[in-house]
Image (cartoon, rainbow, N blue to C red):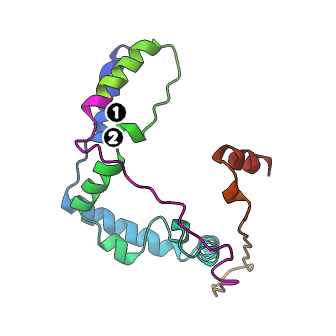
Amino acid sequence: SVSDFEENLETLFRLGFEPYFEERSVELERDIILRELASYQDHPDWVCYQNLLRALYHKHPLRVDIVGDDDSIHAISARTLEAAHGHFYQPRNAGLFLAGDFDLEQVQAVVEKLSDDYAPLSKEKIERNVAAKEPKAPKQARITTRMYTNLPRFLMGYKDRQASKLSAKERVQRELMA
């Protein structure tokens, strides 16, 4: 309820920043993810999109399905999830969006206290090298996959050589204008 705002906000922080992973739960979830991954291979649009990303990029993380593959999913354990959680699920990597009638200064004070309480023990900054040195040309000109579909699927992509010279704001503006 509105009267329990601070308590509810603390519950939200606890849910987001206190990991709880049991090995048995991870095993069960792994099986679900593997079945889901296998089901994607039956969706022509998904296969076509993943092929496009693999054809465009040599090294960029976009070329790898965000879900992973059989090997990477089998490698996940409660310990690896706890390590990933410790590095990435931190108040400094989070955003809080509120709407309604509230006292901004009160909310800021509560969030600052909770952020300190749930801050990681390690202050190590994580290197995020998403902008891998990527050749200008696509990795492959074409990928063809044969599947049973009612209509052929086709995607075409290109690498915008000018985009890397633009600021983040300019890239967003350019994308919005497209």
Disc 2, disc 1: CB below 8 Å?
Answer: yes
- Is residue 154 positioned above or below 87 on the image? below
Crowding near the residue tagged with mark 2, few <14, some 14–19, many ≥20 C-alpha atoms within 10 Å:
some
CA separation in Å, label 2 and label 1:
6 Å
User: In the rendered image, which residue does mark 2 sit on?
Assistant: 16
* The magenta stretch spans residue 139: yes
Number of marks in picture? 2
Q: Residue at x 67, y 43 (%)?
A: 169
| Residue 23, disc | none
User: In this rendering, is residue 176 above or below 136?
Assistant: above
Q: Is residue 25 magenta?
A: no
Q: Which residues are magenta?
A: 115-143
Query: Which residue type carries mark 2?
Result: Gly
In percent of the image, x 66 and y 48: which residue is there? 167
Q: Can you see residue 35? A: yes
Can you say whether 83 is above or below 18 in the image?
A: below
Can residue 8 be seen from the camera position used here? no
Instruction: Please provide percent x and percent y for residue 101.
Output: 51, 13
In the image, 2 versus 72, the foreground residue is 72
Quadrant in the picture for the N terminus: top left
Judge left or right: residue 67 versus residue 74. Answer: right
Residue 70, position as x, y percentages in the image:
38, 76
Q: Position of residue 134 (x, y in %)?
A: 59, 70
Crowding at mark 1 (Cα within 10 Å: few <14, some 14-19, many 20+): few
- Specify the amino acid type for callout 1: Leu
| Residue where numbered disc 1 is placed | 12
Q: Nearer the viewer, residue 149 or 58?
A: 58
